[in-house]
Image (cartoon, rainbow, N blue to C red):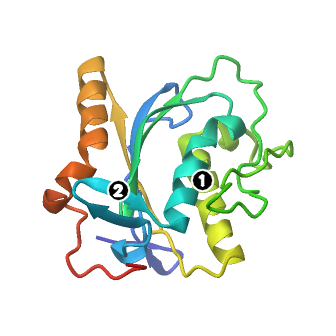
Amino acid sequence: MTDLFRNRYRIPSAQAAWWDYANNGAYFITICTHDRVHLFGRITNGIMNLSDIGMVAHQCWMDIPAHFPFVELGAFVVMPNHVHGIIIIDNQDNQIETQNFASPQNPSPQNPSPQNQKSQNKFGSQSKNLASIIRGYKTGVTKYATMNNIPFKWQSLYHDHIIRNDGEYLRISEYIVNNPAKWEQDMFNKKDGKGLF
């Protein structure tokens, strides 16, 4: 379904209109590659084997708290054509300055960690919400791909789910951890997915 906005069709946001995504809370995130193409690696015997860009997608996620100090990470996995992860926003002080995440200095698969940058995010209070965290993460991975001539593109949107209680948190965490072993039944497993493998 699409909406007409400024005489152009657009896909409506999947986010909950009633929720402020700068609120403290735990969020289950899924981000897919464009057309769900298998670019991050392949699964063999239930084990995910990461490609170069898959290793960068993993490392950039692990680096999120270095750039957004009010974020903690829960379970996370890189799959052939998507990532699943839990982001926990725990902003104890509204005056925390967010660092610019989208500035990796040519990370490599041997050392994929972007160097920390002290530049301040230009988006003001918007720099402390979930969308800015995901935008920074996606930009970091895309920048690496561009700098290394890797054909890569994210799906434009991402899926989020607000985790409401401890039981749900544990169930989702278990789903994420076990995702590679259940790849054959995964809804994101496109049998005709083309990619690096």
Label 1 vs label 2: CA separation? 21 Å
For mark 2, does the 10 Å Cα neighbourhood hold few (<14), some (14 to 19), or many (20 or more) residues? many
Look at label 1 and name its amino acid. Answer: Tyr
Which of these two is toward me, 181 or 129?
181
Query: Foreground mark, 1 or 2?
Result: 2
Task: Label 1: state its secondary structure.
Answer: helix
x, y percentage for residue 32? Answer: 40, 63
Which of these two is toward me, 186 or 13?
186
Position of residue 176 relative to residue 187, above or below, is: above
Residue 142 lies left or right of residue 11; in this view the side is: right
x, y percentage for residue 175? Answer: 24, 40
Position of residue 35 relative to residue 115, above or below, is: below
Position of residue 190 relative to residue 20, above or below, is: below
Look at label 2 and name its amino acid. Answer: Met
Dividing the picture into quadrants, the one containing residue 195 is bottom left
Residue 64 lies left or right of residue 38; in this view the side is: right
Q: CB under 8 Å between callouts 1 and 2?
A: no
Q: Where is mark 2, residue-wise?
A: 48
For mark 1, does the 10 Å Cα neighbourhood hold few (<14), some (14 to 19), or many (20 or more) residues? many
Residue 196 lies left or right of residue 185; in this view the side is: right
